[in-house]
Amino acid sequence: MLAKVFSGAIYGVDAYPVEIQVHSGRGDPSMVIVGLPDAAVRESKDRVITALVNSGFKPHIGRTTVNLAPADIRKEGPSLDLPIAAGLLAAKENFDPSVLQQLALVGELALSGEVRRVKGVLPMAMRLKAEGFKGFLVPAENAPEAAVVEGLDIYPVRTLREAADHLAGQSRPEPFRLGADPLHSGSLQPGEDFEDIKGQEHAKRAIEVAVSGGHNILVIGPPGTGKTMLARRLPGILPPLTLEEALEVTRIHSVAGVLPAGEALVTRRPFRAPHHTISDAGLLGGGVHPLPGEVSLAHHGVLFLDELPEFHRNVLEVLRQPLEDGRVTITRASGTVTFLCRFMLVAAMNPCPCGLYGDARQECRCSPVQIRRYRSRISGPLLDRIDIHIEMPAVSYAQLTSAAKGEKSADIRARVLRARAVQRERFRGISGVACNAQMRPKEMQAFCRLGREAHELLRKAMTVMNLSARAYDRILKVARTIADLDGKDEILPHHVAEAIQYRALDRQV
């Protein structure tokens, strides 16, 4: 007998519907899975048969053929276990075909018949709704994630027996509903606060400017000056995610398998800090079946690269396109996958190999040649894509022992939100631009006009510092953000002067 059951599968961060066709006939007892299954899918026949037996069902004795359509796309992972088991039962138990036409299933099966969570349920739910399905049976741990999609009934199942009872009409549970707004149900603020940092007021100001405009920033300073401490507190001043941004981030985290169990949405902007030994595939994403890398997991959030010169040169160079385009395209023989990766880059580095260059208390023994060689590990084109370079000197003893508290993250965040509100209004109706750092030449021409005095100041800086055209654009964008923080519509000379000061590595050693 022939039965049809529907499910979904992932390609990149997108999903597509899968039709599982099961035919049970006569012949030697065997089960064949066709339709370009990978090793995990081919192994599912053993998991499925054992789960059926342990759930109290008698599997078909004879030849069984399972076809996964469309047959020209490779299916991977264990997420098709549950729909294959449901197809076997439907071919034997005569489930109502009208029910099977309206429902889709996904889930991994344990040998005991337990249904385990899988990756990519959110993009599957979004695609299945678009395809006209009415309900979706998912593992219980994936139910909050899938329930974010409105208009699709989500039924959490914990065992194969529960799924079979639902398909047979023996139980009709209520669809899963989220109890509260998932975007605002969690805490948006991390525990670490800027008030814990002693001194370094100019660095805090630079971080505030960077976050206000979404600018990339590089912090240079000797060991122990608080570079990493500063970066770790940055999430506390980031603006909240919008619903559209949260859905994009959650899709990526769901496909990558890093979305916590039982969580509906990613409610805080991501903060990713990979080790400097990471490969280019780990950073950008890749593999035989490409998965998102760290740049995509940092989408709409922060990518923190500590000890920047210690990263492999080829790893740093592959950052150029993601920083410029906000997306990364990976091509394999099986096809091309595009991952979104619009993130804010925050990097930290020592000023020289020994780390003491510019330290007033300790002598640096590195020669100018050594310093240039060390800094040349970061190419000029990559530096041009970093809007702000700042230097952090060592903290004095008086600052360390001072009882005075620094400014709180909440106060800094309030100013950031005001500046972002100005930008949101400025770019209303302009596609692809949400903050100053994302401005294209057309928007810069409209919103970054300079007066005569500010124009002359920038011309002199370009000549003396021998800046590139890309650095010129970066200075204008940062100056626009500084003016927004100052509550000014016009970019004034002192806004341009502050932006020029944030190009530390453009000066000669």
Image: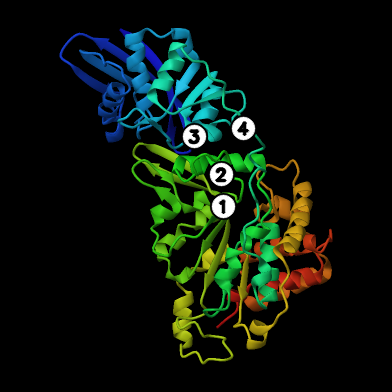
| In contact (CB < 8 Å): disc 4 and disc 3 | no
User: Residue tagged by mark 4?
Assistant: 178
Along the polypeptide, which appears first: circle 3 or circle 1?
3
Give the CA distance from mark 4 to mark 3. Answer: 12 Å
Label 4 environment density (alpha carbons within 10 Å; few <14, some 14–19, many ≥20): few
Could you say where residue 485 lies in the image, as x and y percent from the top left? 78, 62
User: Which label lies toward us, 3 or 1?
Assistant: 3
Circle 4 SS class: loop
Q: What amino acid type should be assigned to the residue bearing mark 3?
A: Asn
Judging from the image, what secondary structure is the residue with disc 2 in?
A: helix
Q: Earlier in the sequence, mark 4 or mark 3?
A: 3
User: How packed is label 2: few (under 14 Cα within 10 Å), some, or many (20 or more)?
Assistant: many
Seen at 40% across and 62% down, the residue is 314
Q: CA distance from mark 4 to mark 1?
A: 23 Å
N-terminal of the pair, mark 3 or mark 2, is: 3
Q: Judge whether residue 316 can be spotted in this image.
A: yes
Q: CA distance from mark 3 to mark 2?
A: 16 Å
Q: Nearer the viewer, residue 160 or 480?
A: 160
Q: In the drawing, does residue 61 fall left or right of residue 137?
A: left
Q: Residues within 10 Å of mark 1 (few under 14, many from 20)?
A: many
Which residue does the numbered mark 1 point to in the structure image?
A: 270
Tag 2 near tag 1, CB within 8 Å: yes
- Amino acid at pointer 1: Pro
**Quarter the C terminus occupies:** bottom right
Q: Earlier in the sequence, mark 4 or mark 1?
A: 4
Q: Amino acid at mark 2?
A: Val
- Please tell me whether residue 121 is drawn above or below residue 467 in the rendered image: above
Residue 14 position in % (x across, y down): 49, 34
**Residue holding disc 2:** 249
